[in-house]
Amino acid sequence: MIKSGMEDVIACQSDICRIEIENGRAILEYRGYDIHDLAKHSCYEEVAYLLLFGELPSKSELEYFKAELADKRELPPQIIGLLTHLPPITHPMVVLRTAISYLGSMDKYIHHRSYEKSIEKAKSLIAKFPTIVAYYHRIRTGQNLVHPNDDFDHAANFLYMLHGEEPSWTSIKALDLDLILHADHELNASTFAARIAASTMADMYASVVAATGTLMGPLHGGAAQKVMEMLREVAVPWRAEEYVKEKLERKERIMGFGHRVYKKTMDPRTIELKVLAKKLADEKEPKWYEISEAIAEAVYKLKGLLPNVDFYSASVYANLGIPDDLFINIFALGRIAGWTAHIIEQYENNRLIRPRALYTGGKNKHYVPIEERD
C-alpha cells in the first residue's frame, strides 16, 4: 500500500520528540517535557541542552553550556571573507548552507562521528548560526559588523548583532520563545533529510546542509515568508474575507493553514505563538496581527482550516524588524538544535534509510538499435 508523501509512515524510533493527539488535544513534548511548560519556564539554551543531552540541566550546567555557546559564536576570518564575496543576490539560506559547508572544510575532525565529537560540532553550529545570519545581513546592507556580545544570551545576542542596538525585553523574550517552539518537531521534512544523510554516515555538516536545503522549500520553512507576502497583499483587515474567497475560488493554497499531523486540532506551537504575536503587536505594530486574525477567521469560516506554526511566525518576525527573506533563517536558528540531536541519534543506532518505490512505468520493452529507429 502506497502512503503518498509517506503520510503516517513510522520510519524510525526516537527519544527526542513526541507528537500525539489525545482526546482531541495535540501533545508536543521534547524529551518528555510539554512544549507549553518549556515555553513558560525555559530558555532556548536550556531547550538545546535538553535536546542534545536528553535531560534538563542543573543551574551550573546551564550556565556552563551558555558560556560554551557564547565562546563559539565568532566566525573564522575565512567565513567572514566568504560572506563578503558572495553575490548580493544570494538568498540568505543559500548563504547559510554555503557557510556550513565551509565550516566543515575547516574542521579536522569532520569525519569523526563519536558522540563526544558530534556534541562539539553541534554546539559550534548552534552558536555560529546566528552570527552567520546577522553578519551577512549587515554586509549586504552596507553596515559595519556588530560582533557577538558575551553578556547577552542567545536570542538577545542575535537581535543585537542584527540591528546594532540592545533589544527590548519583549523582543528578547519573543525571539527566545520562537526559537524554543521551532527547536524540534519530530520527522518533519528537513529533519528527515538530515537523518537520511546521517544514515549514510555522511558528516554532520553535510547532514545539516541537507536539512537547510530542504527547509528552504516554500511548503516547509519558506511558508512564513509566503504568509508575510499575503499579509502585505491583504493590507487591511476588512479585505481578508474577500481575499480568502477569491483564493479558494481559484483553488489556490492559502499559506499558513493546515498541517500533516495536526489535522483537526490546533498545533500547540500556534497556541503559544498567537499569544506572543499579540504581545508584540501591543508594543510595536498592531497591523500585521490584526490582518492575521481576520484571515484566520475567514479561512476557518470558509474552509474549516486552523492556522499552523508558520502563520503567526510572520507577524512575530515582522515586529522584530526581521526582513522577509530572513524568515527561513530564523526557523533554522531554532531548528539547528533538533537537527543535530537527530543526527547524533541516527549515528548512535544507525541503519541506512532506503525506502522503495512502486514502479508504474512501461515493462519488457524491446530495444531497437538507433539506426533502425524511425
Image (cartoon, rainbow, N blue to C red):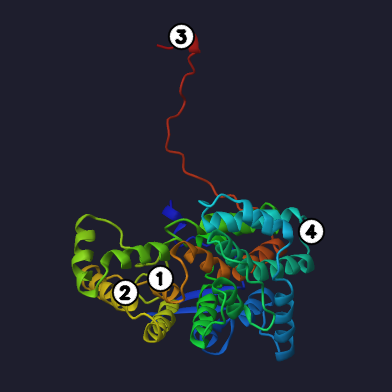
* Badge number at residue 292: 2
Q: Secondary structure under badge 3?
A: helix
Which amino acid lies under the numbered mark 4 shown in the image of this protein? His
Front: mark 3 or 2: 2
Judging depth in this view, the residue of 139 and 118 nearest the camera is 139
Determine if residue 205 is in view.
no
* Badge number at residue 127: none
Which amino acid lies under the numbered mark 3 shown in the image of this protein? Glu
Q: Secondary structure under badge 1?
A: helix
**Mark positioned earlier in the residue sequence (3 or 4):** 4
Alpha carbon of mark 4 to alpha carbon of mark 1: how far? 38 Å
Alpha carbon of mark 1 to alpha carbon of mark 2: how far? 9 Å
Residue at horizontal 71 percent and vertical 89 percent from the top? 58
Q: Secondary structure under badge 4?
A: loop
Q: Are marks 4 and 1 in contact (CB under 8 Å)?
A: no
Which amino acid lies under the numbered mark 1 shown in the image of this protein? Ala
Front: mark 4 or 2: 2
Which amino acid lies under the numbered mark 2 shown in the image of this protein? Ser
Left or right relative to 310: residue 305 = left
Q: Are marks 1 and 2 in contact (CB under 8 Å)?
A: yes
**Mark positioned earlier in the residue sequence (3 or 2):** 2
Where, by quadrant of the figure, is residue 229 drawn?
Answer: bottom left
**Mark positioned earlier in the residue sequence (1 or 2):** 2
* Badge number at residue 112: 4
Q: What is the crowding at mark 1: few (fewer than 14 residues within 10 Å), some, or many (at least 20)?
A: many
Where, by quadrant of the figure, is residue 280 drawn?
Answer: bottom left
